[in-house]
Image (cartoon, rainbow, N blue to C red):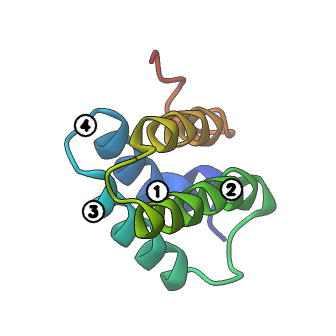
């Protein structure tokens, strides 16, 4: 059985790309939802918790952009992704903490 750190590996790479501004918020939103759909109900609760919170933030970002595309809350989404990344990296057998 996969460890929580192993389960979170696919997400940490994506989160790092977004936090380090290698991908746009819209690309992050699309890829994040795709990853969640690939793993429905199969993740350890310690992995699910930060991802669930981040999903709510992604959903809020998408909704706000539909309402007013010029008033982007990308900064807030990036901060939420950074916090989720920190939590995932703290899992047993994780790769350590992110310094941002």
Q: Could you tell me how many numbered marks the image carries? A: 4
Of label 1 and label 3, which has the lower sequence position?
Answer: 1
**N-terminal label among 4 and 3:** 4
> Element under label 4?
loop
Side (left or right) of 47 relative to 6: right
Q: Mark 3 points at which residue?
A: 27
Label 3 neighbour load within 10 Å: few <14, some 14-19, many 20+: few
Precedes in sequence: disc 2 or disc 4: 4
Outermost top residue: 99
In space, the residues marked 2 and 1 are separated at their CA atoms by: 10 Å
Horizontally, residue 74 falls left or right of residue 56, namely left
Residue picked out by circle 1: 11
Quick check: marks 4 and 3 in contact, CB under 8 Å? no
Work out how far the residue at label 1 is from the one at label 3, CA to CA, in angstroms.
Answer: 14 Å
Tell which tag, 1 or 3, sits nearer the viewer.
3
Residue where numbered disc 4 is placed: 21
Mark 4 or mark 1, which has the lower sequence index? 1
Secondary structure of the residue carrying tag 3 is: helix
Question: For the residues carrying marks 2 and 4, which lies nearer the camera in this image?
Answer: 4
Question: Contact (CB < 8 A) between labels 2 and 4?
Answer: no
Q: In which quarter of the image is residue 43?
A: bottom right
Distance of mark 2 from mark 3, alpha carbons? 22 Å
Closest to the camera, between mark 2 and mark 3, is 3
């Amino acid at each position: 059985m996969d460890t929580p750190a192993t389960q979170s590996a696919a997400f940490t790479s994506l989160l790092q790309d977004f936090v380090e501004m290698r991908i746009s918020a819209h690309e992050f939103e699309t890829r994040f939802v795709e990853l969640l759909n690939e793993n429905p109900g199969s993740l350890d609760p310690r992995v699910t918790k930060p991802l669930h919170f981040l999903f709510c933030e992604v959903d809020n970002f998408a909704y706000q952009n539909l309402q007013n595309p010029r008033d982007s809350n990308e900064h807030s989404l990036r901060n939420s992704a950074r916090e989720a990344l920190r939590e995932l990296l703290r899992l047993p057998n994780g790769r350590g903490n992110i310094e941002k």
